[in-house]
């Protein structure tokens, strides 16, 4: 039986869920791992809730479905916490990473998440400070690396610079590094 890590991404159309999922998969591929990265598409439009999925394994992945029992859930838009059960199916001792200014302990108490590990980072603030716009998908990727060690920070930086040229790439890398440093876990 192949063991793999499954990540479910929650965001809204236009927030970069697909890009973040693909960057994570590209970093894992760079490290010689097997990957899958795909969104759940429907009639979504900018601002509509959507899902993205990433699987990472050391062996071939034969599963071809969405992620129902993730090891990690990443929430790019904290407003979704009020409308979507983001912890649905999250494995016991799974990790929840949320873009919020709340402390992990405070968020964990609100979610009654006694059996999960909660990580938070204010990716919105970081992206506004570093990029100058509320584009926080790469900041969330930096925090995910810290929370999970699924891939190295160096690999994420490399694929980000390949994806985004010039100053855009450099700003995204700065956001990744800062969120890696500022992410907190409970």
Image (spheres, rainbow, N blue to C red):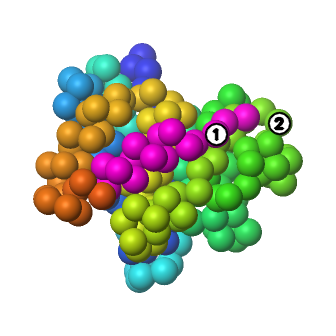
Residue at image x 42%, y 82%? 46
Quadrant into which the C terminus falls: top right
Task: Evaluate whether residue 12 shows in this view.
Answer: yes
Please say if 165 is above or below 42.
above
Q: Is residue 173 magenta?
A: yes
Q: Is residue 115 magenta?
A: no
Cα gap from disc 1 to disc 2, whole angstroms: 17 Å
The image quarter containing residue 151 is top left
Tell me: 1 left or right of 38. Answer: right
Q: Which residue is mark 1?
A: 184
Dot 1 falls on a residue whose secondary structure is strand
Residue 137 at x, y percent in the picture: 41, 58
Tell me: 21 left or right of 11. Answer: left
Tell me: 153 left or right of 34. Answer: right
Q: Which residue is mark 2?
A: 114
Magenta span covers which residues?
Answer: 172-186
Task: Evaluate whether residue 53 shows in this view.
Answer: no
Residue at image x 34%, y 28%? 152
Please say if 183 is above or below 33.
below
Majority secondary structure of the magenta segment? helix
**Observer-nearest of 99 and 31:** 99
**Observer-nearest of 44 and 130:** 130
**Mark 1 or mark 2, earlier in chain:** 2
Quadrant into which the N terminus falls: top left
Residue at image x 66%, y 36%? 185
Residue 32 at x, y percent in the picture: 21, 23
Query: Callout 1 environment at 10 Å: few (<14), some (14 to 19), or many (20+)?
Result: some
Dot 2 falls on a residue whose secondary structure is loop
The image quarter containing residue 170 is bottom left
């Amino acid at each position: 039986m192949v063991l793999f890590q499954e990540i479910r991404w929650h965001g809204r159309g236009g927030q970069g869920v697909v890009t973040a999922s693909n960057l994570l998969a590209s970093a894992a591929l760079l490290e010689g791992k097997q990957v899958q990265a795909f969104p759940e598409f429907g009639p979504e439009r900018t601002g509509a809730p959507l899902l993205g999925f990433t699987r990472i394994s050391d062996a071939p992945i034969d599963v071809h479905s969405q992620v129902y029992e993730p090891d990690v859930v990443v929430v790019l838009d904290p407003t979704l916490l009020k409308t979507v059960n983001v912890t649905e199916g999250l494995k016991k001792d799974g990790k929840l990473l949320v873009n919020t200014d709340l402390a992990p302990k405070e968020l964990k108490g609100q979610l009654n998440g006694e059996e999960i590990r909660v990580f938070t980072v204010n990716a919105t603030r970081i992206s506004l400070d570093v990029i100058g716009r509320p584009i926080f998908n790469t900041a969330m990727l930096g925090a995910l690396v810290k929370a999970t060690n699924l891939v190295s920070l160096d690999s994420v930086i490399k694929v980000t610079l390949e994806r985004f040229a010039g100053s855009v790439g450099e700003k995204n890398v700065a956001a990744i590094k800062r969120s890696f440093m500022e992410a907190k876990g409970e």
